[in-house]
Image (cartoon, grey):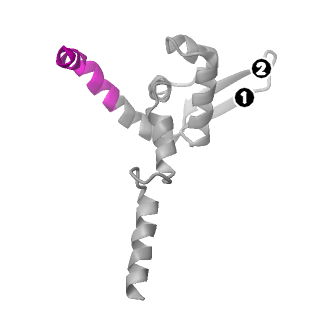
Amino acid sequence: MSNSNNDLNTLTQRFERGDLFAQPCPSREILKHVCSRWGVLILIALRQGTHRFSELRRKIGGVSEKMLAQSLQSLTEDGFVLRVSHNVVPPFVEYSLTPTGEEVAHHVAALADWIELNTLRVLDARK
């Protein structure tokens, strides 16, 4: 019986910690949202403060309206982005980072900085 309790504790600990290598782990979905091309760029853009949808679209070159909306919705559902809808004429929506979003954006920005600083090395490696 102690083996099954140990197994249960191990599974519980793995689930609480997350296990990206396990197919059913919910952390994979979060990883997909945070590390997608548009997710990364949204998180970095919002580090500079609150933005309206149209401001984000202009700032993030090449993103379609549909992909921006989907990415913002995912990041909002994950608790990284706060969506505030203003009931005025004409109506507008603003997006900003939550405290958790600030935290994850810090890590994503560090990766983006590394990529920017090492782009030439990577391009040389491709040759």
Image quadrant containing the C terminus: top left
- From the viewer's perspective, is 88 left or right of 17? right
Image quadrant containing the N terminus: bottom left
Task: Tell me if label 1 and label 2 are in contact, CB under 8 Å.
Answer: yes
Q: Which mark is residue 121?
A: none
**Residue 7: quarter of image:** bottom left
Looking at the rendered structure, the secondary structure element under dot 1 is: strand
Q: Earlier in the sequence, mark 1 or mark 2?
A: 1
| Residue for badge 1 | 85
Q: Is residue 94 above or below residue 103?
A: above
Question: Residue at (80%, 21%) from the top-left corner?
Answer: 88
Write down the region rendered in magenta: 110-127
Q: CA distance from mark 1 to mark 2?
A: 7 Å
Q: Is residue 43 above or below residue 121?
A: below
Q: Any magenta on residue 99?
A: no
| Residue for badge 2 | 91
Question: Residue at (61%, 41%) from the top-left corner?
Answer: 77
Looking at the rendered structure, the secondary structure element under dot 2 is: loop
Tell me residue 95's x, y (percent).
60, 28
